[in-house]
Image: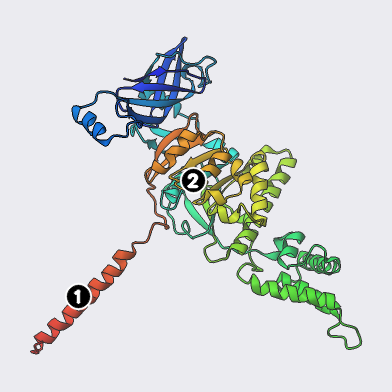
């Protein structure tokens, strides 16, 4: 089916066409010239009329032209060149000839494009529901992914569909669940392993725990005392003689014995007392974080399951501590495995991390430990089998360096111009014409682009068939039901009164 004819000057990346029929944005088309069959996607459409142009300012004249019936309507569109169908979608070296017919791409070509080795089914084409959209799993895991959308556009459903598809490959998935959406979820392809947000201090590095104790880097004497106490606690635990005593208590008791508090003849060391006070303050501040019997979180990750760290009951600072601790340990573990030269050991340590509320964990305008380790894993993770998926409804406040490392994107509806600009600046594949389509996407529709897909794609994301939390609350129905029940109860009581012989 011919949808238009190329006009004007063409380039290696785009062509303009005129049509007498209205095609749809996102449809794939083909153009045959110079022995090539080139695939493209309609990215822009304009409907106009030469007689009714914007230079006419006389309303009556416009009304008269309209009443006569105008046949000068035209449809102008723009096609983004995607590549030669017969040459593995390589970009052509010669531009399209003006006058070349543009035809809708047939279903067989599209099915071949979305036929990948390790498919992750996201949904179907928005304009052709009979064509499944499958993306390649490996680039998602090794080159990272961002899922971005305004609130209510279908972000959580998209994450759930992705998780369930990856579970089909028994890939270890780790979700930093900021709102407890996935704690009680049910996935057809795998189970949920809920992990408590607890850290055993004995698994923390010195600099990690020192920062939590609020010991400044320039407080050399405090740091020296703290390091002595830290090494003492580790030594006691390694002997296995103090397993019943909390790690921080071991440090505190050691410092207490050196402070001179119990020795009337000794002078109290105020510096040591300051460190002791900071340990006590930290124990109160992080009472929900530290747990002496907690296992190393990394060791609790299970393959073939979605491992959910429930962060719904902790504040943002504690969440940042947990994210940085887990990402650091995971990266170090993978690096250690890589240095052994055993590729199988390295593969066993592979994890795909999904970070909900990425704008909180990797904020654009402030520094945080979680942000630094997200950036680090984004840069180095692919070498060691660690993948990242950043999920956010506020892309403009996500750190640009982290976002630009996401070589794949699933972008649902975005209306805020600053969000659009921030996403476009982080992605080389997102053209201005595609950006212009973002506000008009319906719920569950997304633009998919990056290394996981051979071509940019407009997708209707599948509806997740399992069970999860996180949908909008039906507040009206809740209070409406309360009112109805109250009315029913009043009616029942009135009927009982009448049955007893009393009248109102």
Work out which quarter of the rendered image holds the N terminus and state it: top left
Q: Relative to residue 441, is residue 500 depicted above or below?
A: below
Q: Relative to residue 465, is residue 285 depicted above or below?
A: below
Q: Earlier in the sequence, mark 1 or mark 2?
A: 2
* Horizontal and vertical percent position of residue 40: 44, 24
Tell me the residue at 44%/33% (across/down).
457
* Horizontal and vertical percent position of residue 254: 81, 74
Tell me the residue at 36%/21% (across/down).
18
Work out which quarter of the rendered image holds the C terminus and state it: bottom left
Q: Is any part of residue 437 visible from this angle?
A: yes
For the residue pair 13 and 83, the one nearer the viewer reads as 13
Q: What is the tally of numbered marks visible in this picture?
A: 2
* Horizontal and vertical percent position of residue 284: 65, 75
Q: Which residue in the structure is indicated by mark 1?
A: 488
Q: Relative to residue 212, is residue 360 depicted above or below?
A: above
- Specify the farthest residue to the right: 265
Tell me the residue at 46%/15% (across/down).
96
* Horizontal and vertical percent position of residue 255: 81, 75
For the residue pair 167 and 471, the one nearer the viewer reads as 471
Q: Which mark is residue 417?
A: 2
Check disc 2 and report its element: helix, strand or loop.
helix
Q: Relative to residue 352, is residue 61 depicted above or below?
A: above
Tell me the residue at 42%/55% (across/down).
468
Dot 1 alpha-carbon crowd within 10 angstroms: few under 14, some 14 to 19, many 20 or more:
few
């Amino acid at each position: 089916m011919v949808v238009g004819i190329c006009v004007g000057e063409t380039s290696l990346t785009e062509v303009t066409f005129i049509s007498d029929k209205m095609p749809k944005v996102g449809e794939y088309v083909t153009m045959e010239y110079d022995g090539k069959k080139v695939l493209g996607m309609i990215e822009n459409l304009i409907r106009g009329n030469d007689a009714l142009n914007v230079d006419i300012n006389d309303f009556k004249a416009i009304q008269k032209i309209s009443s006569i019936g105008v046949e000068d309507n035209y449809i102008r569109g723009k096609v983004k060149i995607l590549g030669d169908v017969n040459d593995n979608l390589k970009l052509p070296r010669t531009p399209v000839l003006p006058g070349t017919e543009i035809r809708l791409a047939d279903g067989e070509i599209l099915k071949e494009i979305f036929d990948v080795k390790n498919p992750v089914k996201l949904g179907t084409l928005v304009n052709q529901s009979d064509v499944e959209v499958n993306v390649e799993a490996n680039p998602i895991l090794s080159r990272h992914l961002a899922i971005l959308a305004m609130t209510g556009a279908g972000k959580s459903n998209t994450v759930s569909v992705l998780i369930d598809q990856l579970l089909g490959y028994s890939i270890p998935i780790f979700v930093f669940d900021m709102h407890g959406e996935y704690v009680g979820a049910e996935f057809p392809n795998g189970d949920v392993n809920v992990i408590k947000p607890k850290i055993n201090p004995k698994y923390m590095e010195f600099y990690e725990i020192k920062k939590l104790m609020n010991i400044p880097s320039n407080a050399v004497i405090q740091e020296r005392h703290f390091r002595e106490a830290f090494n003492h606690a580790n030594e006691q635990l390694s002997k296995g003689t103090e397993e019943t005593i909390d790690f921080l208590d071991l440090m505190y008791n050691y410092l207490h014995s050196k402070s001179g508090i119990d020795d009337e003849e000794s002078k109290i060391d105020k510096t040591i007392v300051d460190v002791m006070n900071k340990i006590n303050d930290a124990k109160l501040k992080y009472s929900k974080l530290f747990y002496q019997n907690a296992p190393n979180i990394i060791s609790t990750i299970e393959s073939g399951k979605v491992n959910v760290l429930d962060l719904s009951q902790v504040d943002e600072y504690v969440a940042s501590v947990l994210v940085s601790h887990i990402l650091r340990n995971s990266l170090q573990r993978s690096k250690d495995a890589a240095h052994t030269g055993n590729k199988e050991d390295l593969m066993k340590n592979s994890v795909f991390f999904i970070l909900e509320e990425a704008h909180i964990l990797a904020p654009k305008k402030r520094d945080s430990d979680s942000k630094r380790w997200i950036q680090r894993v984004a840069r180095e993770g692919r070498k060691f089998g660690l993948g990242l998926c950043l999920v956010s409804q506020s892309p403009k406040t996500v750190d640009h360096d982290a976002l630009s490392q996401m070589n794949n994107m699933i972008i649902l509806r975005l209306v805020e111009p600053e969000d659009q600009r921030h996403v476009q600046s982080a992605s080389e594949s997102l053209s201005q014409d595609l950006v212009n389509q973002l506000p008009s996407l319906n719920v569950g529709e997304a633009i998919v682009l990056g290394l996981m897909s051979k071509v940019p794609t407009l997708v209707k994301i599948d509806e997740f068939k399992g069970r999860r939390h996180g949908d909008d609350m039906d507040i009206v129905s809740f209070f409406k039901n309360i009112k109805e029940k109250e009315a029913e109860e009043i009616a029942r009581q009135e009927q009982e009164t009448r049955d007893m012989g009393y009248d109102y």
